[in-house]
Image (cartoon, helix red, strand yellow):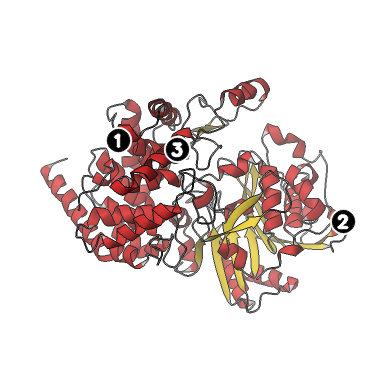
Amino acid sequence: MTPAGDSLDSQHLLSESAFAAKLCLPLIRSAQNADGGWGFQAGLQSRVEPTCWAILALRAHESTASSGEVPARGLEFLQKAQLANGSWPAAAEESSGSWVTVLACWVLAADAQAREAVAAGVKWICNDWPHDSATWRRWRARLFSHRNITEQNDSYRGWGWTPHTSSWVEPTSLALILLASTPVKLLPKGAARRRELARCMLYDRMCPGGGWNCGNPMVYGVAGEPLIVPTVWALLALRDEPKRPEFVMSLDWLERNIGNARGAASLALARIGMEAGGRKWPQGATTIAEMYSRNEFLQNIAVASWACLASCPRHEWLRGGVAESC
Amino acid sequence: MRKPDIALVPSFQRTASRVAIRRAVNYQQDLPAVIYQTLRVFELPVKGKTVLLKPNLVGFDPLCEMNTHPYVIAATRESFLRLGAAQVLIGDGPAMDRDTEAIIESVRLREFTGPLGGIFVDLNLDDVKRVVLSTHASRLKELYLPKTALGVDFLVSMPKLKTHHWAGVTLSLKNMFGIVPGSCYGWPKNVLHWAGIDKSILDINAALRPDFAIVDGIVGMEGNGPIQGTPKPCGVLVLGDDPVAVDATCCRVMGLRPEKVKYLNAAGTLLGHVDAAKIQQLGETVASVRTPFAVLDEFKELREPEGGVWN
């Protein structure tokens, strides 16, 4: 990329940042519920996932004490939502934990007073093994299965969306991002092995030409189509090996497919993935602001939050702890 | 608000179902007229009511090969409004990609319906309510389901006519997987696979049985569906007041035996009619539109025997 290209990229980022400040942040702030949390849209019940994205976005853009009150109330909501076993539920009424435990730990890790809560959450995550890849199940599958549906190595194990199910790319990637930024003293025994198995699982589940979908690279011998959202999370989880061929191939796939992004979620996350991979944003690509004008993000708070995070250079928020303000 | 207790009725107590087959050779036809005229025949209780259309939106699909065609969705919406519905929502919770906007933009839904604000509901992200499952077909005891789907007066399942590599066929009953919210169960909704796809289909439909079904069979999909199959022109819309009967009829149109589709056969006991004798056929006959669909070898037992013809 030429210096002129650098300049263009900076201008683009600046315009995205202005868009985030003018439109996304007010949208997020105004959607906060009385209990401190956020629903997926304004007026919907508070849930752990949108609350986490909203807090990350607000933290990344705001630094003054007064503006910090909004995320602080969100943190209180998160702490109250934790279940007795250390996990967090996807919806308020649910009594069992889910993948959103990763997000809650990620967000609360910046709060010194939440250290015990985070440690309990991380312990729950590390003890939550998917059941599809249990030894007895793999043995049984080899013995009895006559349908070779997928071609993947089930000895690699990541994380599922819900406990005791199968490993999938997005929850595995998010768990890896969390564990990479968690202080060693908070990690339970065996966390290193889980990370290694999960990394192997992600590489194993990569689609043949690079990129990831939910976790089915081949079904009945037919190559699965990668998708932007899981590809970005996997790239972020594996970004400490940027020269590995799988990483480069997947980043190439992402770069080639930015023009195919049809939703603001994909576009915002693609922006984050490209930046984390050290690539420049292509000249003339659709902007998030243009995407907003189509459907107003379907009023999705998570997407508005990703749009905010995409406008932050350096992406400190990915490293855990308190983020620098943009 | 819908009455949940009408979902489960033993087939011997259930009155005959009505299914209409309408020819529609392509997506350039006047579908609003075709659908409106057909819906009028059913005299549906939708005046002043809130209707939810639940299409099958599974993935990025600029050619509309795997998703319910947006023109069919828009034409149905227009028809229900003409019939006096107070509000007609469109909602789905895609299973494989959490960027729902990307899917609906790829099929150009907005071009057919107009702005989606206040019309489209992402069922993956809606508020949820705990629903205790009374049928116990699968090992699931409860599901958290979207309040919008639970709260509307009239629910319409609008699948694409497709074969499915795990369930055999995916029609109006299997389409109801899309109401299970990804925000609770993930992308894909893996708990349903673990509980058994066939059995989960029964539990979900018993908990929230569609009041009506409209199948987009103008161009369907055969072989390795629901995503990687081959487009199959079939030239029909299949509409009916019993989703089981609609699915059974669609199987017959596809040259498949509905009794051999595990979940459909089981659904025929309590959720609706599979038996052709209990289905009042309107419009075209099955035989006149029958278009055999290819299935994977695992499902070859679904195929009708050579020469098998329905009325």
**Three-letter amino acid code at the position of disc 1:** Pro
**Three-letter amino acid code at the position of disc 2:** Ala
Q: Which mark is residue A125?
A: 3
Name the residue that disc number 1 marks.
A183
Q: Which sits earlier in the primary sequence, circle 1 or circle 3? A: 3
Q: Chain of mark 3?
A: A
Q: Which mark is residue A313?
A: none
Quarter that holds the N terminus of chain B: bottom right
Q: Residues within 10 Å of mark 3 (few under 14, many from 20)?
A: many
Q: Secondary structure at mark 3?
A: helix
Q: Chain of mark 1?
A: A
Q: Residue at x 37, y 49 (%)?
A: A266
Task: Work out whether disc 1 and disc 3 sit on a shared chain.
Answer: yes
A307 relative to B183 in the view: left or right: left
The number of numbered badges drawn on the structure is: 3
B277 relative to A290 in the view: left or right: right
Quarter that holds the C terminus of chain B: bottom right
Cβ–Cβ under 8 Å for marks 1 and 3: no
> In the rendered view, would you say B85 is above or below B146?
below
**Three-letter amino acid code at the position of disc 3:** Ile
Q: Residue at x 31, y 58 (%)?
A: A71
In the rendered image, which quarter is residue B52 located in? bottom right
Q: Position of residue B109 (x, y in %)?
A: 49, 61
For marks 1 and 2, give the CA distance. Answer: 68 Å
In the rendered image, which quarter is residue A237 located in? top left
